[in-house]
Amino acid sequence: MRKEKLGRSDEKELLYKSLRGEKEAWGEIVKRYKEAVYGVNLSILKDEAEAEDATQRTFIKAWDNLEKYDMDRKFSTWLFTVGSNISKNIVRKQNRWSFIEKMSLISGNDDPQEEIEKEKRRKGIRKALFDLEPKYRAPLIMRFWGELSYDEISEILDVPQGTIKTRLHRGKKKLKSVYQEVGLNE
Amino acid sequence: MSNEINEGKDELGHKIGEEWESVVESESDRLENMEEIVKDNIDDRNRFKPFNWLIRIKESFNRLLDNLTSMQQYAITGGAVAAIVIGLTLGWFISPSKEGSQGNAVIFKVAASNAQEVDLAGDFSAYKPINMKDENGDGVWKVRVPLKEGKYEYYYLIDGKKVAKNYPLADEVVRDWKNRKNGIRFIGEENKNKQDDSTNHGKSA
């Protein structure tokens, strides 16, 4: 994650301006955080279009609820929490749907051909990452791409710190075995 | 914190970080102009935020009362209350029908730059298409629909077809029986608050 964009000294000023309703200031916040929020949402959702949708909704919901953000806390953690709640809700609804999909001939995606192409493009460690369960993938991405602390990951995903450590450990093990199993070592 | 982060960041950790960076970079087209889309949407939301005008009236009224003697304050407050009561009573009798209430004008918008015709359909129109307009020619089609408080499901028809679309203004996205996306809007403060419990995180007690 390109950290130089995040947590700059003028961030608080932009947030105060946003609280006063200055949408240009919020636009600057979106510009700085959109990649980070997208990366976190994609780690939970796995689907690029869903992650894009969730990212837009994250910034709209965060704007609507900005007065609930405590200025003494780290802004990125709060923003990622808003995003991860939106993404987790989407996953919950998808799980409800997956039962119906299995019972019928309905395709699981809007465009099956696009899904096949997408799968083909995913190789090596990327494929192994996308094949992991979200409960392992999300902490791995937050830790090693987002460089977030255990404490922050625990807060964002609303999971105890001990569980996060276990999932990171198991996630790495699973990733290694999937990676080796498919013989895609680079 | 950096020591803690480096702990466990072995070769695999580095690979995960690098790979995810390239995943996000390869999808940068999706994120282009997101700030403009978000600004556009929050702008419209603000304009239609209910009760903003009431808060402003209350603030102005309080400021006015601060500068008056207690006798004048009683007179003004009494006058205002009487005016409201008379207004409401008259409104009740003059109003042609309670059924005809128009509700809030809620904006719906969708980006479809190459479309010839775009329609909105939802449970509020019994899924009959409502014609949308691209007044600025910028590919963003809009329509305002008067809606009362409640939960509404909707989708867009682009050139007559229901297509897979994102719903940035939706409070929720659900799937229809064919597993295509539909947006959900909650209109009214009471309904909207049901959705907002996830954002209290991070607030000190």
Image (cartoon, coloured by chain):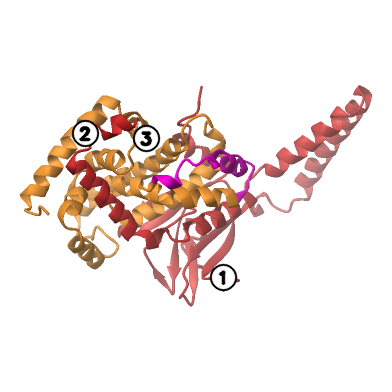
Chain colours: A orange, B red
Chain that bears disc 1: B
Magenta: main secondary structure equals helix
Q: Are marks 2 and 3 in contact (CB under 8 Å)?
A: no
The image quarter in which residue B83 lies: top right
- The residue located at (22%, 54%) in the rendering is A101
Quarter of the image for the N terminus of chain B: give it: top left
Chain that bears disc 2: B
Name the secondary structure under disc 2: loop
Chain that bears disc 3: A
Q: Are marks 2 and 1 in contact (CB under 8 Å)?
A: no
On the same chain, marks 2 and 3? The answer is no
- The residue located at (44%, 71%) in the rendering is B158
The image quarter in which residue B82 lies: top right
Tell me the residue that label 2 is attached to: B8
Name the spot of residue A159 as percent of width and height, x first: 31, 30
- Per the model, the C-alpha gap separating discs 2 and 1 is 55 Å
- Per the model, the C-alpha gap separating discs 2 and 3 is 20 Å
Q: Is residue B78 left or right of residue B183?
A: right
Residue A156 - label: 3
Tell me the residue that label 1 is attached to: B133
Q: Residues within 10 Å of mark 1 (few under 14, many from 20)?
A: some
